[in-house]
Image (cartoon, grey):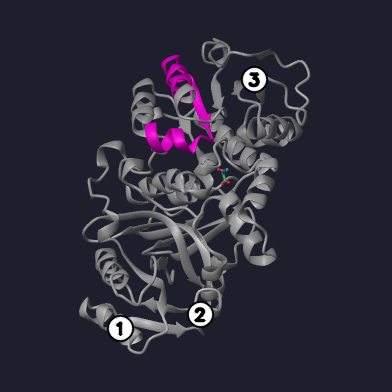
Amino acid sequence: MKPVKVGICGLGTVGGGTFNVLKRNAEEIARRAGRGIEVAQIAARRPNPKCETGATPITADIFDVANNPDIDVVIELIGGYTLAHELVLKAIENGKHVVTANKALIAVHGNEIFAKAREKGVIVAFEAAVAGGIPVIKAIREGLAANRINWLAGIINGTGNFILTEMREKGRAFADVLKEAQALGYAEADPTFDVEGIDAAHKLTILASIAFGIPLQFDKAYTEGISKLTSADVNYAEALGYRIKHLGVARRTEAGIELRVHPTLIPADRLIANVNGVMNAVMVNGDAAGSTLFYGAGAGMEPTASSVVADLVDVVRALTTDPENRVPHLAFQPDALSDHPILPIGECESAYYLRIQAKDHPGVLAQVASILSERGINIESIMQKEVEEHDGLVPMILVTHRVVESRIDDAIAALEGLADVVGKVVRIRVEQLV
Ligand code: HSE
């Protein structure tokens, strides 16, 4: 059988990795796919020194690939929302299957792209968009298809996890570690996407849709980054038996779906609390399987290429199957998506770590306790440290039981209004993940 011809758009970290893996493992991949895969064209503005493209034709214009009649599958690895969106729509319009690693594109334009792909009977595959080399989309969409998914929680930004790990283990400065993550090819073109949680929210949006059978709704995700975390909170969390991780959490409740990305205290003995460096991990809790944990490299040249090529193999295998019977993009049949709402953050429920800086006066602790108890907030643990020399204030650290967020907002406002409380109360959500 003739090989399937693919065009790679973008020869950066992931594009270069994809070309290299396809070349190195060509024989084994063909044995798996049932046909050879030939890279018939590459679109790149500049060569990638880590990638020996030999005689493969190269164009500077990505639309040459989308319009190339010889190409069966377009691999979109240019990133970003705008050009990638146009490219993918053009490829679909031309009847080509698409493989993409672009989480921003899928999270923001996925509903439109999938509708167009269904119209044209082509596949759009995006395993590499979430958690790099971990086949978590396939695991949820296919491996856990028997389950009603209750919740999922993941460390889904490698750069952020790398920064938190280096800060905690080596006391390195935030900016310094970020620079290293950029040099290693982990960080987004705009690294605020990593540190402010936007990249994780893109990925969480995709995971939630696949887990719960809802349309993609990135605009409703609550997003909080790691840039304001202090080493004081990292250390107090440790003293209380927790680790701080930047987590994406999606949980199904009666009222709606929680969709939130924020720093989170996790008990230090949980496996996921010990996922360090650029590694990612996603816990998925289903009613039949219970809790499952998927772990691996969340970014980088070949781990991400591993998922791109796996998608390509799926496309090649599916070329012979009935288009109506392919695995649906969002796991559930398109006409069976649910309209269960995404909850605003104020209606989400979590436990909370609170750090209060108070003047060293009698009765402050009692006032704090009464503000919390008046709002039905139950304290799980409390730690009061000695007066700090530099400011004469006493750090008070509390961990609460689970409570709806709006009640904590109200309590924080009241706490910040106390005459003896100085500055803002630090609030970090806590998840037990059991
Ligand atoms: N910037 C992303 C990360 C790349 O650090 O996880 C992989 O999506």
Tell me the residue at 51%/54% (across/down): 227
CA gap between label 1 and label 2 equals: 19 Å
- The tag earlier along the polypeptide, 1 or 2, is 2
Q: Name the spot of residue 238 as percent of width and height, x first.
A: 56, 75
How many discs appear? Answer: 3
Q: Quadrant of ligand 1?
A: top right
Tell me the residue at 41%/38% (across/down): 107
The amino acid beneath tag 3 is: Ala
Tell me the residue at 39%/67% (across/down): 423
CA gap between label 3 and label 1 equals: 61 Å
Q: Is residue 108 magenta?
A: yes
Q: Nearer the viewer, residue 375 or 53?
A: 375
Q: Using the image, determine if residue 188 lies above or below residue 430.
A: above
Q: Name the spot of residue 59 as percent of width and height, x first.
A: 64, 13
The amino acid beneath tag 1 is: Ala
CA gap between label 2 and label 3 equals: 50 Å
